[in-house]
Image: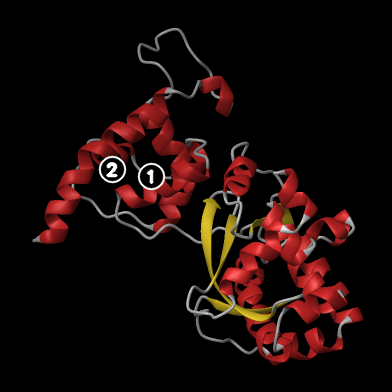
Amino acid sequence: MGASRSLARTRPELSDFLKSRRERLSPETLGLPRGNRRRTPGLRREEVAALAGVGVTWYTWLEQGRDIGVSTGFLDRLARVLRLDAAERRHLYLLVHRRPPTESKRTWCTMPDLAQRLLDDLSHRPAYVLNLRWDVLAWNAAADRVFAFSAQPPERRNLLWMLFVDDATRRLFDAWEQQAPRLVSSFRQDYASAPEDSEIEQLVQELEGVAPDFKTWWRQQDIHGPCLGRRSLFIPDIGTLDFEHMTLTLDEDRHLRLVYYAACASHPRHEMFDAWLEASPAMEEN
């Protein structure tokens, strides 16, 4: 009963959506003659049906919101005929209660305009933005004090590369031999979601060539459980300090994530961390 009611709710929206996408296309766009007797904007139903490889009656029923079944193959053909973008294609699948097909992700290096202001507002909380390849695209002063992103060459400002190649970053992650394999496992999920991204593949190949530990763990194919949201970092003048951390989606379409750290309030030295941050020239300028 629940599924039937849900379908009944979305059929009118499906009808309106298909009609609007059909009407926005000109026949010339798809190589069709306009003719002199076209009384409706855009494509005719029979034109869409023919291009999608179905009968006009069947397509008319679909656009009218009738209770008929559709295959994923047809939905893909219809999306191509109607020139739907990725968001519209997902919407079409959801309207007919089909799981949207998985789309291969890719690396983006553009930041939302407001992101840096958000980072800077977190003055005592180290925070930075990663893309799918784990390039560090932006950070605040607290994160730079901890991770020294600005000291890295721009082409090597990548969290995974730093973790295995940069000695200071290796020292930062306390109990590195325990934390690094889990980070490799986490990166593997992004790698698997972007099989056609040559930039991610290039990063893996370069790391295998210069970091034996990475090569070993990468080829072991170990998959660890979800991160528990705690990390131990060795902070100069303080010692090892436990942090809670969280990853927030900043831009879903571009696969940008904001990583946020906060010293654990239960740690006996957590108040020393704020003082250590304040001693940084960059923090004093802020």
| Front-most of residues 114 and 200 | 114
Residue at the spot 63% in from the left edge and 70% down from the top edge: 272
Q: Judge from the rendering whether residue 267 lies leftward or rightward of residue 272; answer left or right.
A: left
Considering the numbered disc 2 on the image, is that residue within a helix, a strand or a loop? helix
Within 10 Å of disc 2 (Cα), the crowding (few <14, some 14-19, many 20+) is: few
Residue at the spot 12% in from the left edge and 53% down from the top edge: 5
Residue at the spot 57% in from the left edge and 24% down from the top edge: 29
| Front-most of residues 73 and 133 | 133
Residue at the spot 40% in from the left edge and 9% down from the top edge: 37
Residue 54 position, x and y percent, is: 38, 44
| Front-most of residues 62 and 35 | 62
Q: Judge from the rendering whether residue 134 lies leftward or rightward of residue 71; answer left or right.
A: right
Considering the numbered disc 1 on the image, is that residue within a helix, a strand or a loop? loop
Q: Which residue is mark 1?
A: 54
Name which residue type carries label 1. Val
Name which residue type carries label 2. Trp
Q: Which residue is mark 2?
A: 58
